[in-house]
Structure formats: structure tokens, C-alpha cells
Amino acid sequence: MHWQLPRSIAGSHQLAPLLTKGHTVKMYNSPSGSNPKKVRMYCAEKGIDLELAHVSFGKEEHRSDNFKSTINSLARLPVLELDDGTMIAESVAICRYLEELHPEPPLFGNTPLERAQVEMWSRRMEMEVTVNISNILRHTSPFFATTVVQVPEFADASRKTALQRFEWLNDELGDKTYLLGDRLTFADINGYAGFVMMSQVELEFDPKLTNLIRWYDNLASRPSAEA
Amino acid sequence: MHWQLPRSIAGSHQLAPLLTKGHTVKMYNSPSGSNPKKVRMYCAEKGIDLELAHVSFGKEEHRSDNFKSTINSLARLPVLELDDGTMIAESVAICRYLEELHPEPPLFGNTPLERAQVEMWSRRMEMEVTVNISNILRHTSPFFATTVVQVPEFADASRKTALQRFEWLNDELGDKTYLLGDRLTFADINGYAGFVMMSQVELEFDPKLTNLIRWYDNLASRPSAEA
């Protein structure tokens, strides 16, 4: 297995090099998948220029013995590698780590209450709403056939649940711009990146869910959504 | 619907009243369920004396229109109510909020790296390991028949996945006492409380998983495990 040369996600944005007090960090990344996207979008919003090392899902590099023994035993992306070889898996853990090195602008909240609300909404978006999209994909896609005990009937059930949760979210959003009100937080990023798999499972928003569609379109229009 | 009088989880422990800078807080709680247990166990470890308001799962009080319109629209427990009526749902969000009011002893890590590792392990325990136990219960128990599109075949698949993840966790634990090494963190609490549903779904640890059993028995022996 060999990695492609790390590439920057800087694109056309002005990004600051990652402040790591002398440490270099690198993220094992894939252009597809919601979880790597969460970190890339977060970094774009923060102005963090993270070195990316490409791991090919298509070639199943993340399932190789080498990857599992040295990078992430769960065969998942993304993973952040620190210069001492420490590996941090889980997109939310990576973003929380980067937030501590780059506190401004705060995307995890400004006060204890706001930070609790970011955690609450981040979890609701991930574990109540977009998990259903992920479950449809995991239980129908040939890509997961060797690693998931696939149950197509559960994919159907997840589709029904997803549609219910979209209605719930539409009601909760009301006329808010972002989940916490007027300001973007990581909860929006976590949710938005989870929705990007919708097209892969032939799910669409019901046009009557105008709050949800407004929220989604607003996120989609941010330059960070391209990250 | 009426709540029972709040009761304290103090039991026989010496607990400090919750430091809230003049604010009172109360948690909507149920004695059953993993998620309320996470907060109670966390509070017992921190020495936080949290007022509890009992909500009856058996009477489906959490599914009443009143509960959903005033406490948690997702009909889930636990929920923390602040004295201005603000509701914080999601057990992890509640614990993070309490951690900010009661920083000592730190259970979410002492350094940016430790805090990332607590987040990583907390998520792995919840979303890779114990979610499978929860899925078995949700897809087989009559309690969930009206709120979950139940797929018994998915419960069977979750049982297989649970057993695979137990082996994975056993390997990851090695001879560590706690998930991060020598010191208890919220990741252990999140994981342990997720395992308590095992008996309800007739799951047991394979006796060969000695690291996992040692970790579990150690957690189970803490006074906080009774909370």
C-alpha cells in the first residue's frame, strides 16, 4: 500500500498553516464519505490548512492489515496523525482537537450552555437524523457487502425513519438560520456533511419542508461546502 | 401527567450540591435505560448531587404531548432543565455541561490530546460497540413496537456485530485498566452504561475475552455503578 502525496484543501481560500506549537499533523482522508468531509468543511470554516493523505476506499486501502494495525483498527476514515505517531480517529474528536489549537472563531460554542447545545444538536443531527441515510447506504451498497451484515428490510425501515426525522428537523428549525440560531456551529457542519450521502440512496427532501431546505441550501452555498 | 417528587441520587455517598452560580437544575430521569444511567454514574463519580424528576417509561410519560412539547420533542431521556426553563437533551451534552460547572476531577481529559482521546473512545464505545446492544433491544422489544420500524433480522445482524466488536474491544483494551490507561474518564462511563442492557437481550461476554471482562468488572465494582 502506498499513499498519494498529501494535498492541501486550501483551494482558492486563504488558509493559515495549522498552529501546532512545532508539531506537524496530517489527516488520512478520502474525498468520498461524510466523515472526512466533516473535518475538511470544519477546517475550511476555521481557516486551517490541514495536510491530507489520500486513502483509497475504492482500492480498500483502509481495510488493509497495514492500515488497521498502524492507523485505525476499525478501518475507518478520517484519522489525524500527530508528529509523534499518535493517531486520533473519529471526525468529531479530530475537530475538537483542532478547536483547542485554533480556538477562533469558536465553532463549538462560546459559553457552557452554548457548548452543551452544540453537543446536543451535533448528536441529534448525527444519531437521530443522518444516521438513517448512512444506514440505507450501509445496508444496500455493494461497497459494504463484505463488512456489514446487510439487511435490506432495515434499509427500507431506515428510509421511513429518515423521512420522519426530516419532518421533525424541519419543525425544530422553524425560521432559524442555523441550528443554534444566528451563528454557524459544528452542529450544522456535522449535520450538513451527513446529508451529502442522500443522492447516493435516492432520498430527497419533500418540497414542503421549507425550513430544512432553506437551512440545507444555506450551508451548501458556503465555500466550505466544497471542501 | 404528573412527575414524582424529585429524589436525590445521593444514596450513601457524600455529595456536594451542584455548583450553578445561583441556578438550580433538575434532570428528567428514568431508573431504566442506559442514557439516564450515564449521567447518574457521571454525577456519582464527580460528587454532584443532581435533583432527579422521575418520568415513567412504563406509563409512556416521555411520549406524551406535554413531554414532547415542553421537555424533549424526541421523547427521550435524560433531559436537564435549567432554572430559566432551558432544556438540555442528550446524556453526553448534559455531562459536558456539568463538567464545565464542576471541572474537578476532570473526566473529559486534562490536555487537548486527552480530551480528543476521550471523545474518540466515548464515540467508539457508544457508536461502534454498545449501539449494537441497543439495536437488538429496539428491534425486538414490545416497548419499541410503536416507535421503531422493527426488523428482527436486523436484531440478529446486530447480535453478530456486537460479538465481533466485543472481540475488537478486548484486543484494544489489552492490559489497560481504563480505555485511556490508568485513569477513569467519561469514555469508560459511556461504555459501561451501554453494556448494562446486555442482560435484557440475552447477550453475554465470551469467557475468553478476559481484558473486556476485567474492564467491565472493574467498572461494575465502583460505587457509581449503582447510581
Image (cartoon, coloured by chain):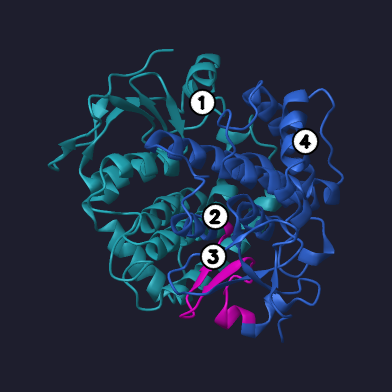
Chain colours: A cyan, B blue
- The magenta stretch spans which residues? B67-91
Q: Which residue is mark 4?
A: B217
Q: Amino acid at mark 2?
A: Val
Q: Disc number at residue B18?
A: 3
Label located before the other in sequence (4 or 3) = 3
Query: Does the residue at mark 2 contact the one at mark 4 (Cβ under 8 Å)?
Result: no
Q: Amino acid at mark 3?
A: Leu
The one nearer the camera, A112 or A19, is A112
User: How far is the residue under mark 4 from the one under mark 1?
Assistant: 27 Å
Q: Residue at x 84, y 37 (%)?
A: B204
Q: Are marks 4 and 1 on the same chain?
A: no
What residue would you read off at disc 1?
A72
Q: Quadrant of the C terminus of chain B?
A: bottom right
Instruction: Name the residue type under label 1.
Output: Asn
Q: Is residue B6 visible?
A: yes
Which mark's residue is nearer the viewer, 2 or 4? Answer: 4
Could you tell me which residue is drawn at 39 percent across and 32 percent down? A30
Contact, CB < 8 Å: mark 1 with mark 3? Answer: no
Q: Nearer the viewer, mark 4 or mark 1?
A: 4
Distance of mark 2 from mark 4, alpha carbons?
Answer: 23 Å
